[in-house]
Amino acid sequence: MNAVHNVMETAVRDLLDQQWENLSISCHCEMCKLDVYALSLNRLKPRYVRDQSGSMYAKASLMTTQARATILTAITESAKVVSAYPHH
Ligand SMILES: [Zn+2]
């Protein structure tokens, strides 16, 4: 049972990689980045897909301006939390 995939993970990771350098956060280390990544995913609704064609469709639906804005808001909010309560 290894056949489902949450495309939201890919979308958040892509956007986080793109925005990481510009993000206002107290620390830009890999640990804090993973914290922001996990927190963001907890805030967003997962999009599970079973196969490749479903994944293409779901990915496209996460590329819209609205979807990207929602994801970016989750990332920004998570960065604030990690800045306030860093784990190291
Ligand atoms: Zn850090």
Image (cartoon, rainbow, N blue to C red):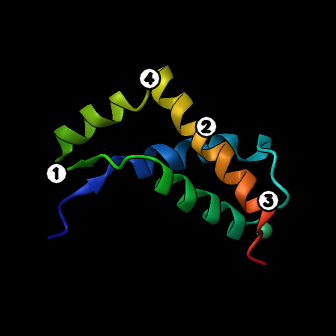
Relative horizontal placement of residue 5, taking residue 85 as reference (left or right): left
Q: Nearer the viewer, mark 2 or mark 1?
A: 2
Q: CA distance from mark 4 to mark 1?
A: 21 Å
Q: Are marks 1 and 3 in contact (CB under 8 Å)?
A: no
Q: CA distance from mark 2 to mark 4?
A: 14 Å
Q: Secondary structure at mark 1?
A: loop
On residue 64, the disc is 4
Q: CA distance from mark 2 to mark 3?
A: 15 Å
Whichever of callouts 1 and 3 sits on the residue coming sooner in the sequence is: 1
* Amino acid type indicated by mark 4: Thr
Tell which residue pokes out farthest to the right in this image. Answer: 26
Q: In which quarter of the view is residue 23 placed?
A: top right
Given residues 59 and 44, the one toward you in this image is 44
Q: Dot 1 corresponds to which residue?
A: 50
* Amino acid type indicated by mark 1: Arg
Q: Nearer the viewer, mark 2 or mark 4?
A: 2
